[in-house]
Every structure is written in structure tokens, then in C-alpha cells.
Image (cartoon, rainbow, N blue to C red):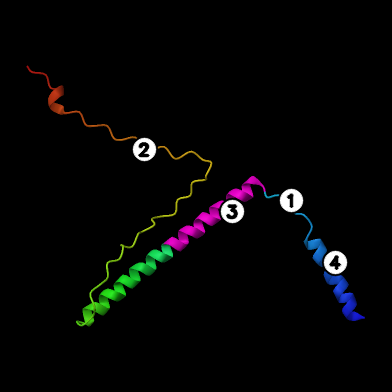
Amino acid sequence: MKSIAVFVLGCSLGLTALAKLPPPSDEAKAKAAETAAKTAHTGKVGAFQLCKSQDKAAAHYRKGNKAAKPAMATPPCADPGPFVYTPAGAPPAAAAPAPAAPVAADKKKKKS
């Protein structure tokens, strides 16, 4: 009898969990997109750190072992840089204006 009651209770809780949830707001979608971008950047940073440590370990091995095979040609480790998030719908940030070229002081002098 107890098992039937537990089964019925479990089914009723399961049905309430299947109730339709409201769609996420634009703010929640933006936050989720930013979190996904930050997670992807964290993965790139981890891969960069792993690459650097593998290069260091291989260099140490070759330094201590003269009979070691020569290094294979591998692409260099790519530093992902700092995390910068730009939303997909936002316009790209305007580039900073180039500094003005200095005016030569000789041109300003008048001949006396």
C-alpha cells in the first residue's frame, strides 16, 4: 500500500515539474550569452596555459636528454588575451582617433 502511495505522489510531483515555464526575458538571454562567452574564453585560457607548460616541459626534457628526438614543428601557443564581451546586437566600439601629426616648428617660424 505504501509503495502505491509513493508512486502516486511521485507521479503528481513529476507532472507539476512538466508545467510550462514562461519564456526567458531578454535580460536573462543576454546574461546567458555573456556567461557562455566567458566560459569559452576560460577554456581558451586553459588551453594556452597547458600549451605553455607542455613547451616548458619539453624544453626541460631536451635540455637534460641529449639523445632526445628533435622537436616536431607545432604551431605556437596563441594567447587569447583578456576577456572582452561585446553583445551580438551591439555595434562595434568606435576606434580611438589617431593622434594628430605634430606640426613642424620650422614651418611656423617666420623669416625676419
Counting residues from the N terminus, which is met first, the one under dot 3 or under dot 4?
4
Crowd tier of the residue under label 1, counting other residues whose Cα lies within 10 Å: few below 14, some 14–19, many 20 or above: few
Q: Is residue 112 left or right of residue 94?
A: left
Residue named by callout 3: 32
Counting residues from the N terminus, which is met first, the one under dot 1 or under dot 2?
1
Where residue 19 appears, as percent x and y from the top left, is: 79, 57
Counting residues from the N terminus, which is met first, the one under dot 4 or under dot 2?
4
Report the residue at 34% width, 71% height from top. Answer: 53
| Badge 4 amino acid | Ser
Name the residue furthest left.
Answer: 112
Residue named by callout 2: 96
Crowd tier of the residue under label 3, counting other residues whose Cα lies within 10 Å: few below 14, some 14–19, many 20 or above: few
Between 81 and 14, the one lying in front of the other is 14
Q: Are marks 4 and 2 in contact (CB under 8 Å)?
A: no
Where residue 80 appears, as percent x and y from the top left, is: 39, 57
Looking at the rendered structure, the secondary structure element under dot 3 is: helix
* Disc number lying in front (1 or 2): 1
| Badge 3 amino acid | Ala
Looking at the rendered structure, the secondary structure element under dot 2 is: loop
Q: Is residue 40 left or right of residue 68?
A: right
